[in-house]
């Protein structure tokens, strides 16, 4: 089929041309005298994205899931009690990993379409006078349902209870796209990956840790090997890795960080909010509902959209791909076949979002969903224009 394949899944996301070009280079010697000129600034600059001035960041040759494992095996000990919540496929997989790694998981199962139950966390923490809970987990952005949770509120709950538990955050589909402040929110382990907000291929797992997490790793008794902080720190401190790093991805990361700083994190967050508002306006105009049950859960990086009864989500995704060269996100696990997702994060602008909405409209109409042609695209255009007018008025 002629033209681009339109990629509107919530990761991997579109790779800017500058980043792609930066990765098109010959192999280089990862033990050369000059290699640290690349790596040391990468570590320093990644910390800026996490807003972590006091701790350090690890870059693993893995997807985000590897950084999850690195966080848990370095910082915790087998049998440790951890408090988690599950409300989508990614929070589910994190719980599953914690169980398989031998932690005692107290998992709060919440309705899919909602997020981290801060009030329930607060109760559990207040009741835990003996401080048995060693870590509290937050999936900041549940990519399966398009739900964003309030990390700062979980920090407040920990502080209110005077509880010393470590705070772990999965920010794979949020960090670099949605507000995140590691130091300010007292996050001990923040996990992300290269293929979402960082606009790179999959293959780098980022783990940003606090001093408290680094201290805990010294007494943590879980077996760790490939992901060992100790091995990493020894070599990272002088600009190297304990094993062969993916040098092209690191060159790409340099380029993507340049783009991120050029635009500015706060502007990136505002752009994601603006584009997400356009998508949400379209969903409303179609007469459809988001999976997120309330506005407070709305994600600025991905929207999961509920399909009417009798419409098969798998067919919708396949039709968009076959007929319109457009990749939309499928429903996962519990919501398989019931929702489709539009990923709106990374290197993205209004025209691209309107393209995705247009392809989605064509697909929905073809699949028998009763929407009015152009209604969603029109609503998004109006939303974008109203926001632009408001900005101009403010500037004047
Ligand atoms: C994508 C994603 C992951 C998994 O990351 P991989 O890079 O596929 O291992 C974990 N959590 C969230 C919230 C995600 O969106």
Image (tube, grey):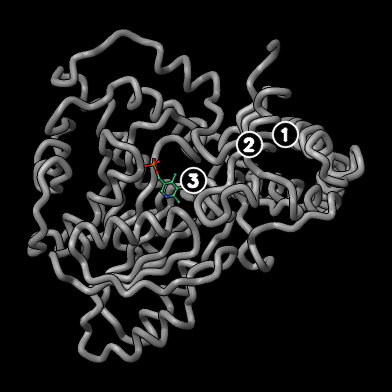
> Which percent across, then down, holds residue 333?
50, 52
Q: Which circle, 1 or 3, is nearer the viewer?
A: 1
The residue carrying mark 2 is 328
Q: Is residue 214 left or right of residue 185?
A: left
Q: Secondary structure at mark 1?
A: helix
* Residues at marks 1 and 3, CA–CA distance in whole angstroms: 22 Å
Question: Which residue is at the far front?
Answer: 310
Q: Which circle, 1 or 2, is nearer the viewer?
A: 2
Q: Say whether disc 1 or disc 3 marks the residue closer to the N-terminus.
A: 3
Q: Is residue 121 left or right of residue 145?
A: left
Reply above or below: 337 against 2: below
Q: Say whether disc 1 or disc 2 marks the residue closer to the N-terminus.
A: 2
> Which percent across, then down, holds residue 47?
35, 47
Q: Secondary structure at mark 2?
A: strand
Q: Is residue 85 left or right of residue 224?
A: right
Residue 176: which disc? Answer: 3
Q: Is residue 66 left or right of residue 275?
A: left
Which of these two is toward me, 162 or 262?
162
Q: Which circle, 2 or 3, is nearer the viewer?
A: 2
């Amino acid at each position: 089929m002629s033209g681009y394949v339109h990629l509107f899944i919530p990761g991997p996301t579109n790779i800017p041309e500058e980043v792609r070009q930066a990765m098109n280079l010959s192999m280089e010697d990862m033990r050369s005298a000059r290699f640290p000129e690349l790596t040391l600034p990468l570590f320093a600059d990644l910390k800026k994205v996490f807003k972590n001035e006091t701790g350090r960041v690890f870059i693993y040759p893995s997807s985000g899931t590897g950084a999850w494992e690195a966080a848990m095996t370095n910082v915790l000990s087998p049998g440790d009690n951890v408090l988690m919540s599950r409300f989508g496929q990614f929070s589910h997989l994190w719980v599953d990993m914690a169980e398989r790694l031998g932690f005692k998981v107290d998992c709060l199962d919440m309705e899919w379409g909602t997020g981290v139950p801060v009030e329930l966390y607060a109760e559990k923490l207040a009741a835990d006078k003996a401080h048995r809970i060693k870590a509290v987990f937050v999936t900041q952005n549940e990519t399966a349902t398009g739900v964003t949770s309030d990390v700062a509120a979980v920090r407040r709950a920990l502080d209110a209870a005077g509880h010393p538990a470590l705070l772990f955050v999965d920010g794979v589909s949020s960090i670099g796209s949605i507000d995140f402040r590691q130091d300010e929110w007292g996050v001990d382990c923040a996990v992300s990956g290269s293929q979402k907000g960082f606009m790179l291929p999959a293959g780098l797992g980022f783990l940003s840790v606090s001093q408290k997490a680094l201290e805990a790793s010294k007494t943590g008794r879980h077996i760790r090997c490939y992901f060992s902080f100790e091995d990493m720190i020894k070599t990272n401190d002088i600009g190297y890795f304990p094993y062969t790093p993916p040098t092209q991805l690191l060159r790409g990361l340099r380029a993507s960080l340049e783009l991120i700083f050029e635009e500015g994190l706060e502007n990136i967050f505002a752009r994601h909010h603006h584009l997400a508002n356009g998508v949400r306006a379209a969903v409303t105009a179609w007469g459809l509902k988001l999976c997120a049950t309330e506005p407070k859960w709305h994600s600025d990086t991905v929207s999961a959209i509920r399909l009417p009864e009798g419409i098969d989500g798998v067919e919708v995704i396949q039709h968009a791909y076959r007929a319109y060269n457009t990749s939309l996100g499928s429903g996962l696990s519990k919501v398989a076949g019931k929702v489709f997702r539009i990923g709106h994060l990374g290197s993205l602008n209004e025209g691209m979002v309107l393209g995705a909405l247009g392809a989605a409209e064509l697909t929905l109409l073809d699949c028998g969903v009763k929407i009015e042609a152009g209604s969603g695209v029109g609503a998004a255009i109006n939303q974008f224009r109203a926001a632009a007018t408001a900005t101009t008025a403010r500037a004047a």
